[in-house]
């Protein structure tokens, strides 16, 4: 379950960091990738799910089973008003493709105008490379395979187009500003590793999520029924992240996809400390290891 981040060389991350690594589903990766500095960062990393819509259909994506909507501009502004004045790293993605939002670039511009640092992970099919180079210090791109047929099979369409954009991003931004994200779901990832190494970019490999919120959509690929859980979570203790879903609702991490079982972060922390695993947290890599 270890994920690796590399830039020419590979760096093995401790399993305890599993979520940033893992499901970065969302910018989380930047936490895990950036690790120590960001883990201690104050203010916390902010993630805003500006859309659940996407032009791809990855089989493992929770977003494909969610209501398909864009965050309206007014809601986005209200979320930003909840942040304090300190500069935050703000990632604009959740379970959709951020660049598919019609107001994506104005949103990026608003973040910059407020002094925040924008970040995204993108499927790289729609990204405006010139603007990305101007406005992002670094950017995450998802590549799971170099095989066009396999990419299409898993729902990552037109791989040749994605790879062309990756090359363009590297030419415009430099390899050190690009983080390639790969979900390990059982495919041969050696070719992707070699590819990223040849580019000189960073590589973040995360195992497919086994938390039931996600895994219910692909039970055959990642079924874990029994876990051993820890009684504390760094996302609740630091706190590490402020996550706003597409409705504007806030939670302490990006891993709670069934918001009907989430009440408050304080409640999660209290329950965990008392030895009860909150429903929202069952199976989360931050606290769970398979038995
Ligand atoms: C949800 S996507 C959103 C951003 C963009 N659409 C993309 O695919 O890069 C963010 C990252 O989460 C990863 N991801 C999505 N579902 C996952 C899952 N079930 N397990 C592990 N990683 C997942 C994606 O591969 C991607 O790297
Ligand atoms: S590209 Fe991203 S948002 Fe779209 S289906 Fe794949 S993982 Fe989900
Ligand atoms: S789901 Fe629960 S255990 Fe997992 S990161 Fe979020 S708060 Fe922590």
Image (spheres, helix red, strand yellow):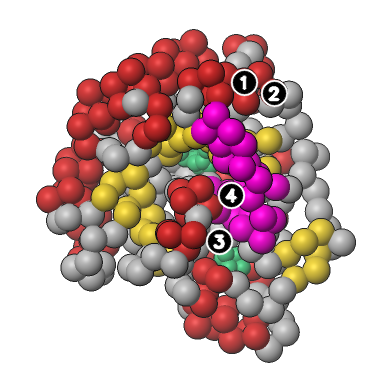
**Membership of 23 in magenta stretch:** yes
Q: Which dot, 3 or 1, sits closer to the camera?
A: 1
Q: Which residues are magenta?
A: 2-24
Q: CA distance from mark 2 to mark 1?
A: 6 Å
Please, what secondary structure does the residue beneath circle 4 have?
A: loop
Q: What residue is pinned by disc 1?
A: 194
Residue that extends furthest to the front in the rendered view of this protein: 9
Q: What residue is pinned by disc 2?
A: 190
Percent x, y of residue 251: 45, 67
Identify which residue is drawn at 57% across, 45% down. Answer: 62
* Label 3 CB-ligand 3 distance < 8 A: yes
Please, what secondary structure does the residue beneath circle 1 have?
A: helix
Q: Is tag 4's residue or tag 2's residue first in the polypeptide sequence? A: 4
Q: What residue is pinned by disc 4?
A: 21
Q: Is residue 227 visible?
A: yes
Q: Quadrant of ligand 3?
A: bottom right
Indicate which disc residue 256 carries: 3
Percent x, y of residue 283: 71, 62
Identify which residue is drawn at 28% across, 46% down. Answer: 118
Q: CA distance from mark 4 to mark 2?
A: 18 Å
Q: CA distance from mark 4 to mark 3?
A: 16 Å
Q: Is residue 251 visible?
A: no
Q: Which dot, 1 or 4, sits closer to the camera?
A: 1
Contact between marks 3 and 1 (CB within 8 A): the answer is no
Percent x, y of residue 75: 25, 57
């Amino acid at each position: 379950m270890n994920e690796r981040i590399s830039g020419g060389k590979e760096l093995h991350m401790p399993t305890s960091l599993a979520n940033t690594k893992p499901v970065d589903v969302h910018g989380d990766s930047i936490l895990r990738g950036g690790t120590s500095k960001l883990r201690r960062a104050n203010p916390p990393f902010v993630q805003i799910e500006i859309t659940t819509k996407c032009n791809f259909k990855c089989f493992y994506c929770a977003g494909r089973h969610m209501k398909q909507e864009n965050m309206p501009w007014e809601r986005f502004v209200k979320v930003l008003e909840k942040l304090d004045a300190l500069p935050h790293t703000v990632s604009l993605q959740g379970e959709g493709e951020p660049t598919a939002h019609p107001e994506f670039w104005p949103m990026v511009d608003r973040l910059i105008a407020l002094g925040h640092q924008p970040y995204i992970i993108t499927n790289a099919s729609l990204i405006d490379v010139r603007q990305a180079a101007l406005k992002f210090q670094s950017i995450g791109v998802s590549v799971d395979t170099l095989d066009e047929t396999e990419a299409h099979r898993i729902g990552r369409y037109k791989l040749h187009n994605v790879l062309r954009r990756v090359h363009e991003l590297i030419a415009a931004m430099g390899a050190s500003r690009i983080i390639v994200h790969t979900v390990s779901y059982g495919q041969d990832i050696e070719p992707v590793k070699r590819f990223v190494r040849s580019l000189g970019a960073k590589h973040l490999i995360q195992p497919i999520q086994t938390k039931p919120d996600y895994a219910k959509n692909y039970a055959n690929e990642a079924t874990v029924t029994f876990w051993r859980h820890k009684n504390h979570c760094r996302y609740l203790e630091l706190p590490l992240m402020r996550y706003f879903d597409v409705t504007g609702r806030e939670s302490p991490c990006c891993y709670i996809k069934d918001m009907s079982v989430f009440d408050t972060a304080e409640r999660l922390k209290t329950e965990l400390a008392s030895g009860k695993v909150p429903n929202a947290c069952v199976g989360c890599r931050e606290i769970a290891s398979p038995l």
